[in-house]
Amino acid sequence: MKARRVYSADGLRSLEDDLCFAKEAYLRKHGWTYTSDTPGCLWLWEKKTDSRTILVSTDTALSMQRHSCSIRGNQW
């Protein structure tokens, strides 16, 4: 059995930061924009399709992007 690695609080923060940067890079690569030009000035991910603009949280954007390959024409 593989030994479990124990992280310090700073090590965990660093891993969380790396994950956050990786999520942002993934969404930007697929055409999402992080913007506060939204109702209430909330920071949300935006993606424009043929007929609509989608504004969602990071987790929702990730989920939508992961499943978009099975949705023809990105019609969410």
Image (tube, rainbow, N blue to C red):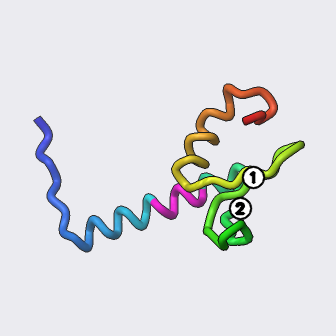
The residue depicted at 88 percent of the width and 43 percent of the height is 51
Sequence-wise, which precedes: disc 1 or disc 2? 2
Q: Position of residue 56 (x, y in %)?
A: 63, 53
Residue 51 vs residue 24, the one in the foreground = 51
Residue of label 1: 47
Label 2 residue SS: strand
Q: Find the residue positioned furthest to the right.
A: 50
Residue 8 position by quadrant? bottom left
The N terminus is located in which quarter?
top left
The C terminus is located in which quarter?
top right
What's under tag 2, amino acid-wise?
Answer: Thr
Q: Main secondary structure of the magenta part?
A: helix
What's under tag 1, amino acid-wise?
Answer: Lys
Q: Position of residue 63 (x, y in %)?
A: 56, 41
Residue 31 vs residue 2, the one in the foreground = 31
Is mark 1 in CB contact (under 8 Å) with mark 2? yes
Q: Which residues are magenta?
A: 20-25
Circle 2 Cα neighbour tier, 10 Å, few/some/many (<14 / 14–19 / ≥20): some
Label 1 residue SS: strand
Between marks 1 and 2, how big is the CA–CA gap?
Answer: 7 Å
Q: Position of residue 60 (x, y in %)?
A: 56, 47
Circle 1 Cα neighbour tier, 10 Å, few/some/many (<14 / 14–19 / ≥20): some
Residue of label 2: 33
Relative side of 33 to 6, left or right = right
The residue depicted at 70 percent of the width and 49 percent of the height is 30
Q: Position of residue 38 (x, y in %)?
A: 71, 67
Residue 40 falls inside the magenta stretch: no
Relative side of 11 to 60, left or right = left
